[in-house]
Image: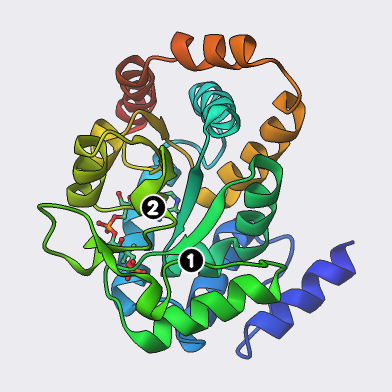
Amino acid sequence: MQHRRQRSKVALSQKIAIPADHPRAKSLYTREKLVDGFKKGLVVPEGLIAHGRGEAFDYLLGEKTTVHARKAIKAAAALLLLSDHPVLSINGNAAALCPKEAVQLSEVTGAGLEVNLFYRTEERESAIKAELEKHGAKKVLGVGPRASARIPELQSERRRVDPEGIFMADTVFVPLEDGDRTEALVKMGKKVITVDLNPRSRTAMAAHITIVDNLVRAMPALIEQARMLKGRDRKSLARIVNRFNNKKNLAQSLKIIRSKA
Ligand code: PTJ
């Protein structure tokens, strides 16, 4: 197992292999994935900065999935399963950090996969689509002329969405998102789930369910929860969602961060 991990690290970084027993090995490995994604044209330089900001919060959270994040993950899995037309919105960082998990989550929950970029270029759209397809995606929405619908009152490139995807979705999963679009999606009447290490970001506060956790830990946990909850009746799933209080959950995550800062 260790041997396999070492090998993949070497493959990711042409510079040096990260020693598996390094105290910050996981964090360094995640960085390498992003740098690799940057070199492949998936991630923008700004995405590297955004990740650094996330790392600071993660450090204060103890770099582990908290009990509060677990509650949010359970509620998010239940909501995705309850939704008629859920869509996972994939940006550059998400494509670099967890392409396989994005495809798996879409398969377990029946959610669509849509490329949506703040720094949108045709090259990046195609590179992200290809990355998702490499990991098994059969249909990728929001690329090229498909992104023909517009989110009202939004000026950034994130406004361009697929009429068969985010535009008609009842629930949108938006990891590492900017506040403007989250607020616009909520205004459109959609349920919004996010993963954001900053519990004070506008996205974290505007979403219905915010998972305050690192995307690289949250995604596998979300897939596991969705697998466990799949098959439960709608009443039981709705109870899980209704019991979740995002405001309270964010306050609890913030309390942990404050206690360490
Ligand atoms: O690929 P594009 O063009 O769509 O651009 C993507 C970025 C990430 C550059 C863009 O969405 C952006 O600028 O994001 P922000 O506004 O910096 O927000 C990113 C949020 O995600 C911040 O609150 C970070 O703390 C948080 N974050 C960063 N890395 C992670 C994270 N949250 C969870 N897991 C992470 N790995």
Is ligand 1 less than 8 Å from the beta carbon at label 2? no
Q: Is residue 185 above or below residue 44?
A: above
- At x 9%, y 52%, the residue is 153
Please state the horizontal and vertical placement of residue 217, each as a whole percent of the image: 60, 45
Residue 102 visible from this viewpoint = yes
Q: Is residue 112 above or below residue 96?
A: above
Task: Please tell me how many numbered marks the rendered image carries.
Answer: 2
Please state the horizontal and vertical placement of residue 10, each as a whole percent of the image: 72, 82
Mark number displayed over residue 141: 1
Q: Residues within 10 Å of mark 1 (few under 14, many from 20)?
A: many
- At x 56%, y 27%, the residue is 82
The mark nearer the N terminus, 1 or 2, is: 1
Q: Quadrant of residue 145?
A: bottom left
Q: Residues within 10 Å of mark 2 (few under 14, many from 20)?
A: many
Q: Is residue 43 above or below residue 220?
A: below
- At x 53%, y 70%, the residue is 96
Query: Image quadrant for the N terminus?
Result: bottom right
Residue topped by disc 2: 166
**Quadrant position of ligand 1:** bottom left
Q: CA distance from mark 1 to mark 2?
A: 9 Å
- At x 50%, y 76%, the residue is 128
Q: Amino acid at mark 2?
A: Ile
Mark number displayed over residue 200: none
- For the rendered model, the colour scheme is rainbow
On screen, residue 183 versus residue 73, left or right, reads: left
Residue 176 visible from this viewpoint = no
